[in-house]
Image (cartoon, rainbow, N blue to C red):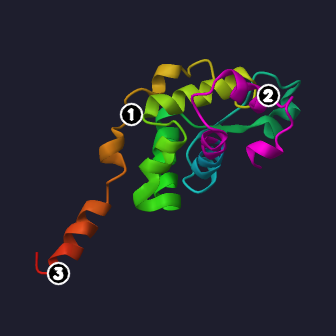
């Protein structure tokens, strides 16, 4: 779904009007990366939210909780998979320049009830998880060195 297709009364559309730091694509990417973390990377421990009515509903209520640090790592891997060498540029274009920005995005989504958190989750869990300049070069530096050797450099 693109921003132009959002109903103006949708919570994310209202959020984008209030907080202009991040583009719609950044929020969508965080949702996609969370799914990537849970399904492809199998991150997250099953937990049961406190809202279930009785124990028979417990199985249906199980969710996979991903920590802030796990989500940051999943975002990094997903961004590299999707965008390769330009991943950091793409994130920057969306207003995301550090792992702290991921925390801001996640907690914005929690505040509008589009994501959930446990009692242990804190916004600060996303601070300084990794340095963007280093994290998005991983694996590419050796590729660049290898390709320059082939040219006699």
Q: Which residues are magenta?
A: 1-30
Look at 70% across and 31% down and name the residue there.
115
Within-10-Å neighbours for mark 2: few <14, some 14–19, many 20+: some
Circle 2 residue: 11
Taking 60 as reference, is 62 left or right?
A: left
Few, some or many residues within 10 Å of mark 1 (<14, 14–19, 20+): some
Residue 96 locus on image (x, y percent): 49, 37
Q: Mark 3 highlights which residue?
A: 151
What is the secondary structure assignment of the residue under circle 2? helix
Residue at 80%, 39% (x, y): give it. Answer: 59
Up-down relation of residue 83 to residue 144 (above or below): above
> In which quadrant of the rendered view does residue 109 lie?
top right
Residue nearest the viewer, comparing 153 with 109? 153
Q: Secondary structure at mark 1?
A: loop
Res 116 seen here: no
The answer to whether residue 69 is seen in the rendering is yes
Determine the residue positioned at 60% across, 52% down: 36
Earlier residue among tags 2 and 1: 2
Q: Which mark is residue 129?
A: 1
| Residue 133 in which image quadrant | top left
């Amino acid at each position: 779904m693109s921003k132009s297709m959002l109903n103006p009364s949708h919570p994310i559309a209202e959020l984008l009007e209030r907080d202009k730091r991040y583009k719609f694509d950044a929020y969508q990417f965080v949702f996609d990366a969370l799914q990537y973390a849970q399904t492809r990377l199998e991150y997250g421990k099953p937990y049961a939210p406190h809202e279930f009515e009785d124990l028979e509903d417990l199985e249906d209520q199980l969710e996979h909780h991903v920590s802030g640090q796990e989500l940051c790592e999943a975002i990094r891997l997903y961004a590299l998979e999707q965008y390769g060498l330009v991943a950091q540029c793409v994130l920057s274009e969306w207003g995301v320049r550090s792992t702290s920005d991921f925390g801001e995005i996640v907690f914005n989504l929690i505040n509008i009830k589009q994501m959930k958190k446990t009692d242990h989750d804190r916004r600060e869990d996303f601070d300084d998880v990794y340095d963007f300049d280093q994290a998005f070069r991983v694996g590419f530096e050796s590729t660049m060195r290898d390709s320059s050797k082939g040219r006699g450099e």
